[in-house]
Amino acid sequence: MMVALLGATTLVLVAVAPWVLSAAAGGKNLKSPQKVEVDIIDDNFILRWNRSNESVGNVTFSFDYQKPGMDNWIKLSGCQNITSTKCNFSSLKLNVYEEIKLRIRAEKENTSSWYEVDSFTPFRKAQIGPPEVHLEAEDKAIVIHISPPGTKDGVMWALDGLSFTYSLVIWKNSSGVEERIENIYSRHKIYKLSPETTYCLKVKAALLTSWKIGVYSPVRCIKTTVCILGGRGRWIT
């Protein structure tokens, strides 16, 4: 009778063992991702998150989204079966003034529960990227041509393109002493510069009505000329 009892116990242990191994491998106890961050710069929409199962390999991640008035969730294009902890959903056509909801889960043999991200309005969350800057050199001046942040067909700033104001920082390349000029527009000319001297500058955009201030453009440098030939200067882009 004792032998029979031991045999039955052994059979139970053998039956349970595969379930335990599956759970240890992440098949049953897969945890939801955490600390999801939404970064929006101009029309670039990026999601970043933290893994909750660092020891479990071959895990992928997928997002759904939901717009106002929708009861169902839709798969988020560009953010399905992602093996890293970052994805880009810039291709999604959104009304940037409407609130959107997101959720994410981890996937392997099974899936984790959904982790819902706090709802947000893209326009309110968006940051202003660097403007594009072109320089034209004269003998004692630099003409600055500024293109608004974002892309030509972008939607984030489509209603605000004429509302941008700009500020810049300029310095002689040889000294590094900076001068700041505020509230300039898309074309600005800086006078009273030294001829045959290299100046460097950077520009950032702002939407004062929305309390948004952007990041600086890459530094551009140009050397002023000795004289203007044929009424034209030299372009640096």
Image: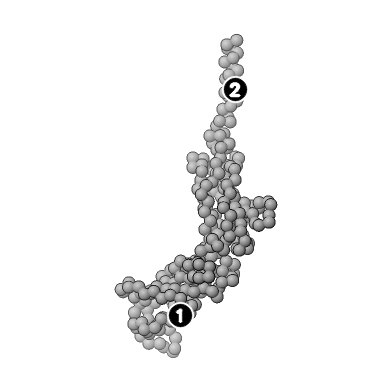
Where is residue 155? Give x, y as percent. Answer: 59, 67
Identify residue for label 1. 188
Q: CA distance from mark 1 to mark 2?
A: 82 Å
Q: Quadrant of the C terminus?
A: bottom left
Identify residue for label 2. 12
Where is residue 128? Give x, y as percent. Answer: 50, 66
**Could you classify mark 1 by the number of other residues whose Cα lies within 10 Å: few (under 14), some (14-19), or many (20 or more)?**
some
**Total numbered badges shown on the rendered structure:** 2
State which quadrant residue 219 falls in: bottom left
Residue farthest to the bottom, as pictured: 230
Residue at 54 percent across and 48 percent down: it is 83
Q: Earlier in the sequence, mark 1 or mark 2?
A: 2
132 lies above or below 117: below
14 lies above or below 40: above
Is disc 1 placed on a helix, strand or loop? Answer: strand
Looking at the image, which is closer to me, 230 or 195?
195
Q: Quadrant of the N terminus?
A: top right
Residue at 51 percent across and 49 percent down: it is 35
In the image, what residue type sits under mark 1?
His
Looking at the image, which is closer to me, 158 or 199?
158
Looking at the image, which is closer to me, 89 or 231?
89
